[in-house]
Amino acid sequence: MGHSFGGGFTQVLLDRGLGAAGVGVDSAPTKGVLRLPFSTLRSAWPILKSPANRHKAVGLTPKQFHYAFGNTLTESESDAAYERYHIPGPGHVLFEGAMANFQPHSALRVDYRKPDRAPLLLIAGEADHVVPASVNRSNFKKYGKGTAKVDYKEFAGRAHYTVGQRGWEEVADYALDWATKNAEGAARTS
């Protein structure tokens, strides 16, 4: 299971034949997903605005954090989450993701039609500004012509900070139940 870029990495690992089942929560898109909403650009802009940030860890201001991660929280709840959890993010990873569709050998390249890939679940948050549900749906649709199992689940009112929001247990339980059920099914058929 992976969140954000961890969800993109989960897709890559499954594509490489690793894992019995994978779950991407608010997953960064893999190469070939072209949807790029304004909210994604606005969320990543503090890092992507300068090429010098490619090899730096870059932090967000509380206001930027509130827009990107805490947009379903009150300002005071978002500020508390910022104080407790915010750490600067690695610019290199965001630049790699931003350039994936322009690099022939991108690390985020997957074979969407790979027939023997382990089952995959993509979970989206309806209110996510960093990786909006529309991006996760586009990523999900890329797998449409393949024969391997892929499912999509969207949670209403969830932001990119989904695992820190009230009710996070519903998302975690759904992901764990799905992964357990589908990993067992994959093991029985192998």
Image (cartoon, rainbow, N blue to C red):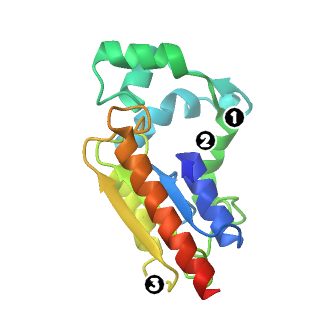
Q: Position of residue 164 (x, y in %)?
A: 43, 32
Q: Position of residue 9 (x, y in %)?
A: 63, 55
Q: Residues within 10 Å of mark 3 (few under 14, many from 20)?
A: few
- Identify residue for label 1: 54
Residue 31 visible, this angle: yes
Marks 1 and 2, Cα distance to the nearest angstrom? 8 Å
User: Mark 3 and mark 2: span between their CA atoms?
Assistant: 28 Å
User: In the rendered structure, which amino acid carries the disc numbered 2?
Assistant: Leu
Residue 129 relative to residue 110: left or right = left
Residue at image position (52%, 59%) is 23
Q: Earlier in the sequence, mark 1 or mark 2?
A: 1
Q: Residue furthest left?
A: 156
Question: At 37% from the left edge and 19% from the top edge, which residue is drawn?
Answer: 78
- The quadrant in which the N terminus is found is bottom right
Q: Which residue corresponds to mark 2?
A: 94
Would you name the residue on which mark 3 appears? 145
